[in-house]
Amino acid sequence: MNALSHGTLRPRMPAVLPKRKPAAGTSRGEERGAGWQIWSLAGVLFFMYMLLSLRIHERMMSNSFDLAIFEQVVRSYAHGRLPVSEVKGPDFPVLGDHFSPVLATIAPLYWLWPTVKTLLVVQAALVAVSVIPLAVWVRRTLGLTAALVIGAAYGLSWGVASAVGFDFHEVAFAAPFLACSLAALGQERLRAAAWWAMPLLLVKEDLGLAVCVIGLLIARRGDRRIGLITAGIGLAASLLTVLVILPAFSPTGGYGHWSGLENATAEGSGLGSLLFRGTIGVITPLEKASTLLLSLAPTLFLALRSPLILVAVPTFAWRFVSHYMANWGVSYHYSLVVMTIVFAAFIDALVRRRPGIPSLRRYLAGAAAVALLLLPQFPLWKLVQPATWQSDPRIGAARDVMRLIPDGATVQASTFLVPQLAGRTSVSLFGWADSRPNPQWILVDTLVEQNRRWPLSFFQERDALDSARARGYSTVANHYGFVLLRRS
């Protein structure tokens, strides 16, 4: 008789895996989605970002480069055209400068509210939303208190503050996609991590390299097939946009930003120079090293213990190799992507270390302390400064003068007046070599502070106005230093 007839063999029952316990302070119902506390945090941050950026614009401190450029891009999409920017040059095709077709998604909102303010509100929402996937990840693993502290530290971090305090930029779209992708990767949801990374290819041409690194991390964490496919798509997309798409649209027939690398490497040649640029030259001058340290400081440098920090390497690389000094520092929007990655790496490192409650509290206190310590040095601090809310009679005077310019006119204006006119005129930058020549109107603030003058100095601006009058322009208004000329 066989063994089965004696009952010695029994059907094998599938093993029942133990259910993962939710983190302390988290109910199972709350664990499935973002709780009201996290949504409230994101809502408060959204209101702060929106208030800051709109107030900066209302005080006429936004700029032609880059707010007016992006307004003209979105307006082109809203009118069913390929994006052009008069600020960059007459009918300049922006798809020949940077590959950011994701901006077309703002067009439906622009139909409802055709103003530059639409872009600022969208940016505030995108950055605030990026807090949610990171905070939900923390809550599932480390608890609600940790989620709120880390979410607030990220939302108030200097890199985020610098971005929302300086105009609008396409990388605002990258923040939520990166946050979702890296949160999924950190929780071993590898397929979801790959899918969330794909939209980054439509945000900017360099982000394909970040997608490539995400793919390699997915392969390293277990799904070799999905990971290698993701990495290949990311690398291929960056090469395709830089070598084919952007040159096809560019007026010069090439990728204009190669000049940054070429100028950075033109100072020397040979093996010694190559080794210097690839090692010490990446973190010198001191401004580069300072930016690197400040990027890691909000996480108490714990982000370095996570492989996710590798996703930031391509961004640091192109910034520090560039000859354009603004890329090296902590101003503007350049650190938004880095900050999202660094905080994702911070969370991943904490989850891997599984610190006890005392250690976790020290990490949370440290991250919060660094965020608050740096806060007064960056734009979010303007919200509590009285000067931000004081009225300025010159702003009213500028608006009175701008009302004299009819809709649809061609205009050249001072850099911070350009965004004020971008929604209803064809406006470019006064004194910029590539601006449309012989506009119908010229508007210049002759009393602006010296540190806000660009691209002309005081004397260059005065000579340019005299030259315009000599060519037949007549003075229509001169009010509080705002000079308006009209072509005869």
Image (cartoon, rainbow, N blue to C red):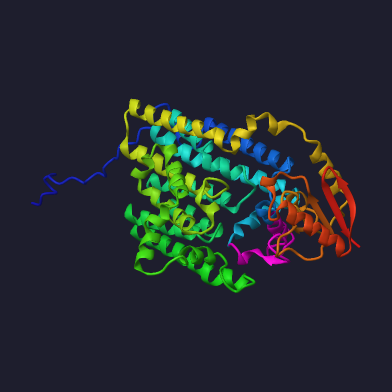
Q: Give coordinates of residue 398: x percent, y percent.
A: 82, 44
Closer-to-camera residue (34/178): 178
Q: Is residue 97 magenta?
A: yes
Looking at the image, which residue is at 40% across and 39% down?
Answer: 347
Q: Which residues are magenta?
A: 71-98
Q: Give coordinates of residue 266: x percent, y percent.
A: 47, 67
Question: Vertically, is 162 above or below 372?
Answer: below
Residue 463 shows in this picture: yes
Looking at the image, which residue is at 61% across and 60% down?
Answer: 101
Q: Left or right: where does residue 103 sit relative to residue 146?
A: right
Q: Give coordinates of residue 117: x percent, y percent.
A: 71, 46
User: Which residue lies most toward the left here?
Assistant: 1
Closer-to-camera residue (375/339): 375
Q: The C terminus appears in which quarter of the rendering?
A: bottom right
Residue 27 shows in this picture: no
Looking at the image, which residue is at 57% across and 32% down?
Answer: 40
- Count how many numbered circles sit on residues in the image: 0
Looking at the image, which residue is at 34% across and 36% down?
Answer: 19
Q: Is residue 375 magenta?
A: no
Q: Quadrant of residue 379?
A: top right
Q: Give coordinates of residue 183: x percent, y percent.
A: 44, 45
